[in-house]
């Protein structure tokens, strides 16, 4: 008798609504503030930057369920459901009694979960008459997804890619160009924000915060152009809840329910995407599932950041957001997990962390790649450096189970594959990777001047 | 009402047997010959090179169905079934009445169909006490699959990769090393065959034929080491029939049956894999499905080669095989579809071509990438340069349908994705790609001295 390995939903079983955890949260997230007046923003205050529907979703604290438009459902069916997989081979290698499952978001045509939000964002833009979209990208996963989604709905896309990853991962920009997008390394000389940064520091290798500034500047100075974001914001995480909603049904098919749910953590969208649908049962039914966000040791906003109102970008173009942050001028080390090199956590996750509904763990770079190698050699999938953090956290929990003998059910999100990140693996195989631990002094330096909430 | 896009089998619906078309063929393939004596070979004559079970499968002209071992079925379940997809977006872009389906073999963790044969070959080696496997790889898809499968069954793997693709696709060798394999560029100085070739031509960029010679030499001079092959041979194509057997059930789910089945063509394993289970119904039930093998214009053995007994490798280490060939010393142009740069066609396909059960088309390199671009921008999957040839052939047929108004059902095999081939797309986007048409003189030069069958 061969045991079932994967659990896959038929197309007619796919979610038709996203889950908006804001509606169920006991303590609602605090509102974003206008930096000049420090007054709370309304949805319409953000219309100049984002498409209107995304702004409304961003601020919606009433509706727990939001309909997924038919056109978006149609495109989701190009690749969803992604499989829920029982990691038998990994369990065997770890010799753990834990049952390890992963939701395989790497099994999308572009290799990560990012497409789940790129499709609705481009769809809403198109519906509202927008012709151009712009964005930033770190590792390149979001930029790739946006480029494809834009092409799908007949929009032009301009992507600012963090310079360090543009160089580390040259295949990414070719991929975006294959989908017809224009790609610019950030910081660039094409925006005021970029010029300012290059003038201050000509060797600046870029960061998500900087690239966001450039993209927002382009959006607000170009007619009929909207900015889109791949993580951090509430509406992005909302779209990503398809991951957890599918996983919930698939865990049922497997006859289990997770004791622990894990996602890697950059801005929070893949973590929230898998976690929130399960967290709902903690909130509403008193379940006791543990939620772990795995961040890099070199960018530890959840484990060592401060909870303050801070900018979402380096130049200070965004509203002030109530979040766990390392300071918007914090410059993360050049780790390979480019998608996790962001100074702040989304506001929903920040509130949930404050309320002890979840917790963070920080993973050193070498431990993350050790975990990725074990995973690749057992399950056959080379994980993205970002996803390696989730795997490392899952392995830590599985090893605890080995010690205690507990048969816990662990579910993690495999947010993407690493086939375009092979240079990172080459460095690892050659023994050239190192860890980057942030000093207490650096954290204090970048956070001390942010006003208290 | 959203139309169903993908058809996916549950794990308990997967094939439990491979289909051996040799048993059903009206004219059986002629036997391989010992080059010295020109006497037919028996299975046991090949035991020094391949594992025994593969040799038996190679020569089996009796059993139409061969059981898939449980251990292989278990590993197949890590990623099978792959989806059968209706290419609605491609159809719309082409404005064709044709119904286009593709079998998405790119949706395997390593990105191509090659794993389907790597798993059973490594499994049989392990069962027979082999400790080391060796092979050649062109584009790197086969080498990657073998490296992973070897790791899975605890074997050591040594891969000779064609030098031109080692340089064109540097990520591939990192990927193989990630799975623990040793990778050597071919021609190398580590074998007599490699040394001879480098001595004759120091700038030799390698070919599959050369790399095969090197790998066979290593296998036959190393204790407990067997050679494995990723295409051409009958047992490899046998393993690949899981593709077509799944597709048959999935087409049934879609309520259609293909008028045309298309695969790209290097040695024949992905083509035979999708085609043979359907061709069975042509042979046994008089169905009239058309089978098209899409080869590169620069390596046109099916459309312009000769049917003769020729060596499978450049150095002449293999048995003589009855096949359509351009001559074993033919050196294909350095096209990006490295997996199609092989001088000969497998013996089963060669016999079927001779018997008019199928036909070949040759695709210029630029047309293949044009097709790949349309596919990427509509269906969201960047195809491997090899698979682009199948897409191009499918587009030709869909355009004929547009002219004639026929609503034909076209099925092609998407043998792999191109995420590791982005430098090829970069050259295409930059306008640097060219076509390579083989001259009649070259074909005559390399084929005239091969003795007639």
Image (tube, coloured by chain):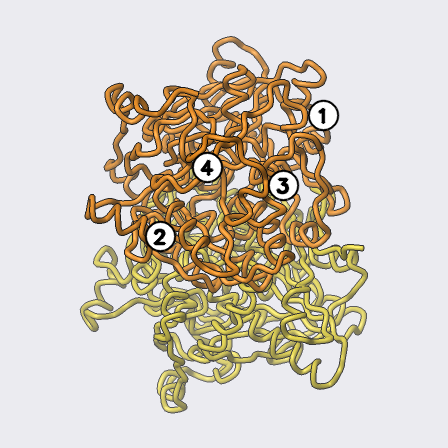
Chain colours: A yellow, B orange
Discs 2, 1 touching: Cβ within 8 Å: no
Mark 4 highlights which residue? Answer: B319
The residue tagged with tag 2: helix, strand or loop?
helix
> Of circles 1 and 3, which is in front?
3
Do the residues at discs 2 and 3 belong to one chain?
no
Q: Nearer the viewer, residue A13 or B406?
A: B406
Dot 1: few (<14), some (14–19), or many (≥20) neighbours within 10 Å? few
The residue tagged with tag 4: helix, strand or loop?
loop
Mark 1 highlights which residue? Answer: B255
Image point 60% across, 31% down: which residue? B86
Q: Residue B369: percent from the left, percent from the top?
A: 36, 33
Image point 37% across, 65% down: which residue? A426
| Measured Cα–Cα span from mark 4 to mark 2 | 41 Å
| Measured Cα–Cα span from mark 1 to mark 3 | 37 Å
Q: Residue furthest bottom?
A: A441
Quarter placement of the C terminus of chain B: top left
Image point 58% across, 54% down: which residue? B122
Position of residue A201 in the picture relative to residue B134 (left or right): left
Q: Earlier in the sequence, mark 1 or mark 3?
A: 3
Instruction: Relative to B260, say whether B51 is above or below.
Output: below
Dot 2: few (<14), some (14–19), or many (≥20) neighbours within 10 Å? many
Q: Earlier in the sequence, mark 1 or mark 4?
A: 1
Q: Residue B24: percent from the left, percent from the top?
A: 67, 24
Mark 2 highlights which residue? Answer: A171
Chain for disc number 2: A
The residue tagged with tag 3: helix, strand or loop?
helix
Chain for disc number 1: B
């Amino acid at each position: 008798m061969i045991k079932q390995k994967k659990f896959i939903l038929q197309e007619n079983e796919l979610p038709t609504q996203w889950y908006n955890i804001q509606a169920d949260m006991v303590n609602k997230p605090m509102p974003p503030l206008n930096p000049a007046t420090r007054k709370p923003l309304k949805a319409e205050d953000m219309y100049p930057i984002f498409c209107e529907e995304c702004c409304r979703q961003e601020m919606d604290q009433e509706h727990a369920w939001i309909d997924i438009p038919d056109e978006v459902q149609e495109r989701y069916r190009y690749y969803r459901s992604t499989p829920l997989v029982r990691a038998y081979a990994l369990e065997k290698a770890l010799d753990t009694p834990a049952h390890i499952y992963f939701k395989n978001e790497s099994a999308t045509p572009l290799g990560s979960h990012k497409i789940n939000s790129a499709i609705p964002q481009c769809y809403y833009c198109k519906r509202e008459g927008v012709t151009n979209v712009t964005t930033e990208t770190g590792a390149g996963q979001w930029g790739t997804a946006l480029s494809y989604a834009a092409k799908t709905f007949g929009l032009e896309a301009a992507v600012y890619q963090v310079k360090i990853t543009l160089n580390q991962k040259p295949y990414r920009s070719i991929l975006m160009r294959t989908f017809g997008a224009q790609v610019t390394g950030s910081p660039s000389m094409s925006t005021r924000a970029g010029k300012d940064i290059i003038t201050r520091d000509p060797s600046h290798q870029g960061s998500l915060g900087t690239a966001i500034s450039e993209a927002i500047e382009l959006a607000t100075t170009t007619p009929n152009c909207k900015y889109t974001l791949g993580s951090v914001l509430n509406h992005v995480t909302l779209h990503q809840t398809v991951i957890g909603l599918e996983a919930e049904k698939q865990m049922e098919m497997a006859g289990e329910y997770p004791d622990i749910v894990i996602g890697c953590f950059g801005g929070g969208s893949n973590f929230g995407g898998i976690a929130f649908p399960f967290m709902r049962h903690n909130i509403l039914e008193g379940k006791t599932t543990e939620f772990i966000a795995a961040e890099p040791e070199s960018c530890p906003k959840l484990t060592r950041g401060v909870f303050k109102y801070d900018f979402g970008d380096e130049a200070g173009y965004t509203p002030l957001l109530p979040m766990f942050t390392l300071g918007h001028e914090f410059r993360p080390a050049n780790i390979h997990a480019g998608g996790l090199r962001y100074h702040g956590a989304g506001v929903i996750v920040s509130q949930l962390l404050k309320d002890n509904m979840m917790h963070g763990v920080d993973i050193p770079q070498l431990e993350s790649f050790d975990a990725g190698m074990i995973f690749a050699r057992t399950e056959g999938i080379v994980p993205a450096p970002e996803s390696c953090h989730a795997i490392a956290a899952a392995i830590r929990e599985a090893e605890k189970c080995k010690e205690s003998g507990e048969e816990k059910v662990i579910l993690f999100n495999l947010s993407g594959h690493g086939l375009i990140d092979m240079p990172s693996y080459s460095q690892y195989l050659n023994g050239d990777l190192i860890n980057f631990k942030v000093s207490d002094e650096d954290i204090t330096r970048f956070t001390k001047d942010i006003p208290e909430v």
